[in-house]
């Protein structure tokens, strides 16, 4: 079974530029998450989708971050304009529908963003 | 809101020695608890979890953790570590009230030395 795919693995941009990250979850997984992991900190949930609807985006900085999951499968996370403090690893994860009780999330390898 | 504290950012240990990685949580309601592991250049993987029942849970590679409600802890232990256990370990908590939102601790880097 293929895992969660993310691209690009690495991205370096100047501040005020824009960047987009792509995620393809495990086939059949209805729930998709984007986490931000800043160096020295634990992953922080940015947004959670159930199919193509948003379940939780309370910690998403909506003035510069946006995310979509139009067909309930893959997802894109965009940052525009980027700030220095956005330097982090962006993790995508997925979980099957109906697995609410197990809590297991399946993570991709992450996309490392460096903002100069 | 729930939170997780991992006091040790780094734990160096010699191979075949025992290790304990500490995790404490804070929540006003009941929770589920998890340990995730991140090997170098890989994504996070579930190591073990406590949902209900026996408070002692075990992984397939020799780790175990015990849920202690009175001390609000979920420490991870292994009696004899191997060089391949070198990784970062994250404790995470989820409210039992649904939503599947995980809150992670800051992580503990376990470095096993020969």
Image: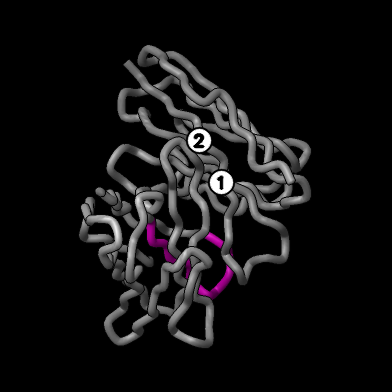
Contact between labelled residues 2 and 1, with CB atoms less than 8 Å apart: yes
Q: Secondary structure at mark 2?
A: loop
Q: Label 1: which residue?
A: A107
Q: Chain of mark 1?
A: A
Residue B88 in view in this figure: no
The residues tagged by marks 1 and 2 sit, at their Cα atoms, a distance apart of 8 Å
Q: Chain of mark 2?
A: A
Question: Which mark is drawn over residue A110?
Answer: 2
Q: Residue at x 36, y 28 (%)?
A: A87
Q: Residue at x 43, y 62 (%)?
A: B35
Q: Position of residue B67 (x, y in %)?
A: 39, 80
Is residue B93 a member of the stretch shown in magenta? yes
Q: Is residue B4 above or below residue A39?
A: below
- Front residue of this view, candidates B23 and A90: B23
Q: Secondary structure at mark 1?
A: strand
Q: Position of residue A46 (x, y in %)?
A: 48, 44
Side of A7 relative to B28 (left or right): right
Tell how many labels: 2
- Front residue of this view, candidates A58 and B42: B42
**Magenta stretch, residue numbers:** B90-101
* Colouring rule applied to residues: one colour
Side of B34 relative to A21 (left or right): left
Quadrant in the picture for the N terminus of chain B: bottom left
Question: Which mark is drawn over residue B34?
Answer: none
Near mark 1 (Cα within 10 A), the count class, few <14, some 14-19 or many ≥20, is: many
Q: Position of residue B7 (x, y in %)?
A: 21, 60
Is residue A45 a member of the stretch shown in magenta? no
- Front residue of this view, candidates A91 and A75: A91
Q: Is residue A110 above or below residue B113?
A: above
Q: Position of residue A49 (x, y in %)?
A: 64, 48
């Amino acid at each position: 079974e293929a895992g969660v795919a993310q691209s690009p693995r690495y991205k370096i941009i100047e501040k005020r530029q824009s960047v987009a990250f792509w995620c393809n979850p495990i086939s059949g997984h209805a729930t998709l998450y984007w986490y931000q992991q800043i160096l020295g900190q634990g992953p922080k949930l940015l947004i959670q989708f159930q199919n193509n609807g948003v379940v939780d985006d309370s910690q998403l900085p909506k003035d510069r971050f946006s995310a979509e999951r139009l067909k309930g499968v893959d997802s894109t996370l965009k940052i525009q304009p980027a700030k220095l403090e956005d330097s982090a690893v962006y993790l995508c994860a997925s979980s099957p529908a109906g697995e609410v009780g197990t809590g297991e999330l399946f993570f991709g390898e992450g996309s490392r963003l460096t903002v100069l | 809101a729930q939170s997780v504290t991992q006091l040790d950012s780094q734990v160096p240990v010699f191979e075949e020695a025992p290790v304990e990685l500490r995790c404490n949580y804070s929540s006003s309601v009941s929770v589920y608890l998890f340990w995730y592991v991140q090997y170098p250049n890989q994504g996070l993987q579930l190591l073990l979890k406590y949902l209900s029942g026996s408070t002692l849970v075990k992984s397939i590679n020799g780790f175990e953790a015990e849920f202690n409600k009175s001390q609000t802890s979920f420490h991870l232990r292994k009696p004899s570590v191997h060089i391949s256990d070198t990784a970062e370990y994250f404790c995470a908590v989820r409210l039992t009230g649904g939503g599947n939102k995980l809150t992670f601790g800051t992580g503990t880097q376990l470095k096993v030395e020969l």
